[in-house]
Image: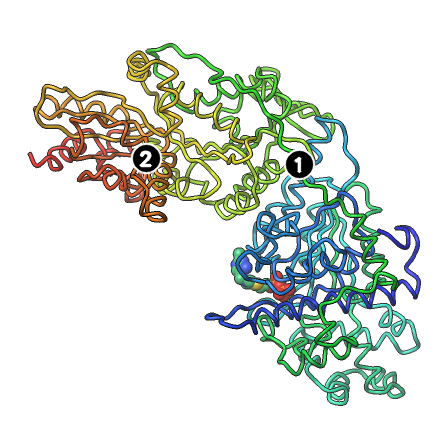
Amino acid sequence: MPSPSPTEPLGPDDLATLREIERRVLWLAVRMVDHANRREGGEVKVGGHQASCASMVSIMTALWFAHIGGEDKVAVKPHASPLYHAIKYLTGELDGSYLTTLRERGGLQAYPSRTKDPDVADFSTGSVGLGAVAPLFSAATRRFVDAHFDERGPARFIATVGDAELDEGNVWEAIADPATQGLSNVTLVVDLNRQSLDRVVPDIQAHRLQSFFADAGWHVTEAKYGHKLQAAFAEPGGEALRERIDEMPNEAYQSLFAMKPKKMRKTFLKGGSLALQEWAADIDDATLADLVFNLGGHDLGLLVERFRECDAVTDRPSVVFAYTIKGWSLPMAGDPLNHAALLTEEQIDAFRTELGLTPETEWDRFPTDSAAGRWCGEVGGEINNEPPKPRPTLHIPAGVARYPDTASVSSPEAFGRILTGFADVPDVRPRLVTTSPDVSISTNLGGIINKLGVFSPDERDDHGGADRLLRWAPSPDGHHIELGISEMNLFLLLGQLGLAHEHHGEMLVPIGTVYDPFVLRGLDAFVYSLYNGGRFIVAGTPSGVTLAPEGGAHQSTITASVGMELPGVCFSEPAFATELDWILCDAVRRLHEPDGESAYVRLSTRPIDQTPFSLARDRVGADELRRQVLAGGYRLRDGDPSLPQGVLLATSGAMVPEALAAADELEDEGIAATVLMVSSADRLYRDWQGQVRALVDDLSLVPGAGHLDSLVHADERGRPLVSVQDAASHSLAWLGSALGSRQIALGVDRFGESGRIADLHDITGISAAHIVNAGLVASGS
Ligand SMILES: Cc1ncc(C[n+]2csc(CCOP(=O)(O)OP(=O)(O)O)c2C)c(N)n1
Ligand SMILES: [Mg+2]
């Protein structure tokens, strides 16, 4: 903070300057939204949230201009993004030309975006509840980085949160998790305006929310009554005023804002105690209104006091419940339907005039020689805006584990072995961090946990029995962060671990595991973390109906499509140990590359005979096979070239045995069957799409041949195709289009149930017999 120092109380002059800045921040934010909605040529409503901005303007002014600095990181409430840009503009960190580009192509994004806004937000926000806890996971990441690398300077992690965001369960999952305990550098500031999108929340039960935080071990404080109200309470008879305000239902209190002072007085006093009437007798209407509306969330001095109080707490995170007014100080204040309301042109003119601005000066910064201008300049200089240094280049071998060529191995088993192999790679070991929502052992993290240990900020005892195979003695040296059963927490943590380089200056290699069906349980956090630019690896294990006895609740089907369709992550579904090894080593390498991305591997507990893979390697050589695996596919079995008729079978992951068995049977019927192994449908699809899109963009280009094409020999071209995957049939159903072949797509398009593998393959139509029949139908036999 520039002036005064963090320990000095704010004097009257400071507060006056801060109030001037607060008013200008609100003006710029409101005018930005107003301008966006009055731009020429708009074909749809542009939108924006002036009331949500007004609600939070005091909190954000107090934070930026009198509290944060240096390395601090803040998540901004989604609908307050114009305030953020207004602040960045006033401090000189954003060029003025952007102010008229809100919600426009190449301009300021509707909601704070790390990756697309020019004044890079620390955290993207938009899906309510996620930004609310992202700083908590960033602080957990900082704690890990500090424990494993040189300790960096202090940093505070702050979330500014709409009160309705606390309806989202992920907030409570996050604060309850042991992995987020004790993070005293975290402060969550709740903008308690008792309004959400559609309504005044009838009974916000702030006290219940506060006790949730307190029960989770947080320091809880309030900015409820402003200094004026507090002074009034202390006067003789003032207690009656407090009683009246406290007892009023939210809706009744909110309705006062729309009233003229005289009517407000009448309504407020009606139903109040005799003592209240007596106390109010000497107070004029305007003063009474000023008092009744003097909430702590708009008292800059009080807010700063609360933030400092939170800083002084050294053993747990803090939350400030700041009582605010949605639409504060604007004509729409407190209106239940103000969420998307916009000021009229006349109201904008009046606001501009109130600030002494004109249409010519309305976008100006403060003069640099004014108190407000100096303060803004100092804040801009104080905040660390350095771009992060490039990620370090990690030297990763092609593979880190070896398997007997003919053994039967499941992909999760291989996964466990490969992870322990990473612990021997010098560039990976110090940066490796594994995490799992209470499924570490069943997802094969036991080996790496034994090798590198469990992380905790302090040394803890291993309470396991002496005969336990697993070493579980948490310490600051450990590399595994165990979470409670919350897939939202898993993906939020992975996302923040995957931003360690940008937020904390040290790159990590985060690897998470989750039962594949429950990827969907954390999907919004998965999307969020990718949208933020986080880089991490996640294994969905085990997956599919091949997990036969476990039944429908644990059998994933649509996750393969989800993995393929999500941007920012490369999805793979390998079957063989070495195939997975190459893919994971490549995935770690892709984490640091400038155009890199995250990775998602879908695994199956079914042991798979490795012989076909060894044969493929012998046919084309290890280097070439690896190139093909990483390009998305390879030939696992060649069809008999002497047969006149043939089909192509394409498969992924655990369906290899059925595909190979069906191929043998089809050849017995006189139909040549080539088996294409799709190691990454995502890579193959992107490659094909890339070719097609380039042509669509530029008709003069000569069509190229993609990797998929290169897998099909000249004499096989045009042959019908049968795809089969232990996942929704749709996920590979595009292959026929890409190859120009007729296709029958087999897959799991219903919920599963318990049984043996053969039963489940039979029930869902993906058995070898189904593949054979599909081959016969496709080839017209
Ligand atoms: C996950 C999600 N669900 C729904 C929405 C739509 N939405 C946008 S704002 C809002 C209410 C926000 O209320 P609050 O957080 O209290 O913010 P404020 O009152 O300050 O505007 C909702 C439901 C969203 N952005 N994200
Ligand atoms: Mg609200």
* Residue drawn at point x = 74 percent, y = 72 percent: 361
| Quarter holding residue 259 | bottom right
Checking the image for residue 339, the label placed there is none
Q: Give above or below for 411 relative to 438.
A: above
Q: Position of residue 260 (x, y in %)?
A: 73, 87
Checking the image for residue 545, the label placed there is 2
Task: State which mark lies toward you, 2 or 1.
Answer: 1
Near-viewer residue (452 or 339):
339
Near-viewer residue (16 or 385):
385
* Residue drawn at point x = 52 percent, y = 24 percent: 445
Q: Give above or below for 747 relative to 696.
A: above
* Residue drawn at point x = 11 percent, y = 34 percent: 779
Query: In the image, what residue type sits under mark 1?
Result: Thr
Q: Position of residue 29 (x, y in %)?
A: 67, 66
Q: Position of 158 compared to 709: left or right?
A: right
Near-viewer residue (679 or 333):
679
Near-viewer residue (79 or 172):
79
Q: Position of residue 180 (x, y in %)?
A: 67, 40
Q: Position of 307 compared to 632: left or right?
A: right
Quadrant showing the C terminus? top left
Nearer-N-terminus badge (2/1): 1
Q: Position of 533 compared to 603: left or right?
A: right
The residue singled out by tag 1 in the image is 141
Q: Position of residue 520 (x, y in %)?
A: 44, 44
- Label 2 near ligand 1 (CB < 8 Å): no
Disc 2, SS:
loop
**Crowd rating for badge 1 (residues with CA inside 10 Å; few <14, some 14–19, many 20+):** many
Disc 1, SS:
helix
Q: Position of 569 compared to 150: left or right?
A: left
- Label 1 near ligand 1 (CB < 8 Å): no
Q: How far, Cα to Cα, is label 2 from label 1?
A: 35 Å
